[in-house]
Amino acid sequence: MPERRRERYTHLRAAIRDKKSLLISYSGGIDSTVLAVVARDVLGNNSACCLITSPLLPPCEEEAARAIAAREELQLFVRDSDILNNPEFRMNPKNRCAICKQESALILHGVADENGLKCIADGTNADDITRYRPGYQTGLSAGITHPFVEAGITKDDIRAIAKMHSIPEYAKPSSSCLATRLPYGEPLETQLLTRIARAEDVIRAAGAQQVRVRVHGDVARIETDPESTERIFVLRDVVRKAFHTLGFRHVALDLDGFESGSMD
């Protein structure tokens, strides 16, 4: 590991140690997984993770998160969120991430208090704060700490640390909640979110590593990694039929490929 990266890693461990006890907002993504593994090594039983489930979390991601936590021997709490019962959030406004972060913070504080954990953290990294992240400031205001940011840890650093800790998902593509598949102002309904999750499963089954199914009315627009675009096109009849079965009238393959935050 390069010297500067090692210095940041040492700083990260010190930042975690200073917190004495820590609950991590956990999703099974590479960021929160690495944070949880390092916290486990530094704090032992004084660290834990909380996975918050809702229709916004793809079922395959929940399953993977549980499996990773078990493999890495992380202390895991799972809590359900009824965020879709919030009328303001359900209308999918531009501040949806802030509303969700507030709801999540309440759940996390409850779990932390129940288990005597003094601090709460998430996997926000130094790269994230240079991008559009509407929930970041809300998290700070709600008492959520960001050890990666404190230590100047970037996404590349996180992948390197994951590899050092022999975490197989070190190259796993980033994921995001299903609300990001819809334009702002398009109501968030459980049935539609379920259809989107199933549509993305179809694309993954075709071999895609990175996938988003963005929905515009009755059009399902597939964004995927460049390497998978040709494969999806070859399998277009299978994909089209599967999407039609899910209730999408039109199916489009975006030739620009996957673009993180394209609905922001």
Image (cartoon, rainbow, N blue to C red):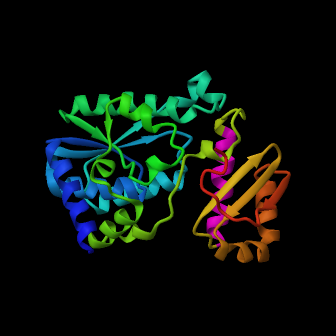
**110 or 132, which lies in front?**
132
Reply above or below: 43 against 68: above
Position of the N terminus, as image quadrant, is bottom left
Picture layout, residue 37 above or below residue 162:
above
Q: Residue furthest top?
A: 87
Front residue of this view, candidates 17 and 3: 3
Quadrant in which residue 192 is drawn: top right
Q: How many marks?
A: 0
- Which is the main secondary structure of the residues drawn in magenta? helix
Residue under the point 81% across and 60% down: 252
Q: Position of residue 184 (x, y in %)?
A: 69, 36
Does residue 113 appear to the left or right of 30 in the view shown? left
Asked if residue 223 lies in the magenta stretch, the reply is: no
- The part of the image, by quadrant, that contains residue 217 is top right
Tell whether 157 sits left or right of 264. left
Q: Residue at x 44, y 47 (%)?
A: 129
Q: Is residue 199 magenta?
A: yes
Boundaries of the magenta span: 191-206
Front residue of 241 and 208: 208
Residue 104 can be seen, yes or no: no
Q: Pinpoint residue 91: horizontal percent, then vertical percent.
A: 66, 28
Query: Is 186 rendered above or below residue 232?
Result: above
Q: Residue at x 71, y 51 (%)?
A: 214
Image x and y of residue 180, in percent: 62, 45
Q: Quadrant of the image for the C terminus?
A: top right
